[in-house]
Amino acid sequence: MSASTAQSPSEFSNPNLEPLLTGEQIQTRIAEMGAEIARDCAGRNPLLIGVLKGAFVFLSDLVRAIDARVSTEFIAISSYGGGTRSSGEVRIVKDLDVPIEGREIIVVEDIVDTGLTLSYLLANLESRGATSVKLAALLNKQERRLREVKIDYLGFDIPDAFVVGYGLDFAERYRNLPYIAVLKDPSQD
Ligand code: 5GP
C-alpha cells in the first residue's frame, strides 16, 4: 500500500478514482432492465445465475427490480487474479448447486470485456440442457471483444478503461464503492 493511499481519508473519494457512472445512473438503468426482464419472463420462473464475485452487487439490485417469480444461484469463474488484464484462462471455481436441465437461465455478469469468460460459461450452461441461456450484463467494453457474445440485457457501454466499484475490484479492493470509477493508476494502489 502506498503512503498516499494510507493517508486517504475516504475510500469513496480516493484521488486515484475517476468517477464514470453515479449510483443514481446505475439504479435508474437497473430499474429499466428489471422491468424489461419482468415483462419477458412473466410466468416463466427463470433462474438468475450471478457470476461471482463481481456480479454480487448488480445481482442484488437487479433481482429487486424484477417484479416476477425468479430464482437465484451463483457460480464462480476464475478471472484476472490480482491484475487488470484477462489471462484468457477460464475455470469454474464454484459450480452451481442445482441441475439446470429444462430451466430458462439468465446469467448475470458485471462486465463483458474480451468475452472469453462469457462465451465459455454460456456454452457450458447450454451443454447442461438449459432450455434457454440469456445474458444480463451491467457493463460492456465492446472495443475489447475477442469472442462474440450476445448481451440480451445491457446496462451501459463503456470505453476501454479498467473500472472498479459496484462489485468490481482491483485486487479485491473497491467492490464496496456505490458508483463505478476508472482506476487511474493501478501501480499507485
Ligand atoms: P472477459 O472474459 O470478458 O475478458 O472478462 C470478464 C471478467 O473480467 C469480468 O467478469 C471481470 O471479472 C473482469 N474484468 C474485465 N474488465 C474489467 C474491468 O474493467 N474492471 C474489473 N474490475 N474487472 C474487469
Image: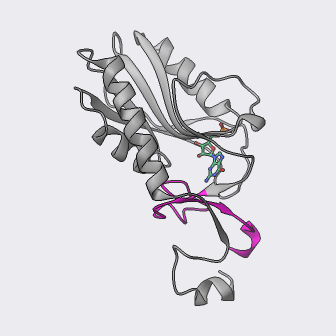
Q: Is residue 18 above or below residue 95?
A: below
Judged by its main secondary structure, the magenta piece is: loop
Write the residue at 59% across / 90% down: 7
Write the residue at 51% across / 73% down: 12
Instruction: Report the image quarter containing ligand 1.
Output: top right
Report whether 128 appears left or right of 84.
Answer: left
For the residue pair 79 and 17, the one nearer the viewer reads as: 17
Report whether 67 appears left or right of 79.
Answer: left
Q: Magenta segment: does it hold 167?
A: yes
For the residue pair 3 and 151, the one nearer the viewer reads as: 151
Q: Position of residue 180 (x, y in %)?
A: 56, 57
Write the residue at 42% across / 41% down: 30
Write the residue at 32% across / 31% down: 97
Q: Is residue 14 above or below residue 124?
A: below
Quadrant housing residue 39? top left
For the residue pair 34 and 168, the one nearer the viewer reads as: 34
Question: What's the magenta region?
Answer: 164-189
Q: Position of residue 14 (x, y in %)?
A: 59, 76
Q: Position of residue 167 (x, y in %)?
A: 48, 54
Q: Magenta segment: does it hold 168?
A: yes
Report whether 85 appears left or right of 138.
Answer: right
- Of the 4 image quadrants, the one containing the N terminus is bottom right
Q: Position of residue 126 (x, y in %)?
A: 49, 14
Quadrant housing residue 163? bottom right
Mark yes or no: residue 27 visible. Answer: yes
Total marks in image = 0
- Of the 4 image quadrants, the one containing the C terminus is bottom right
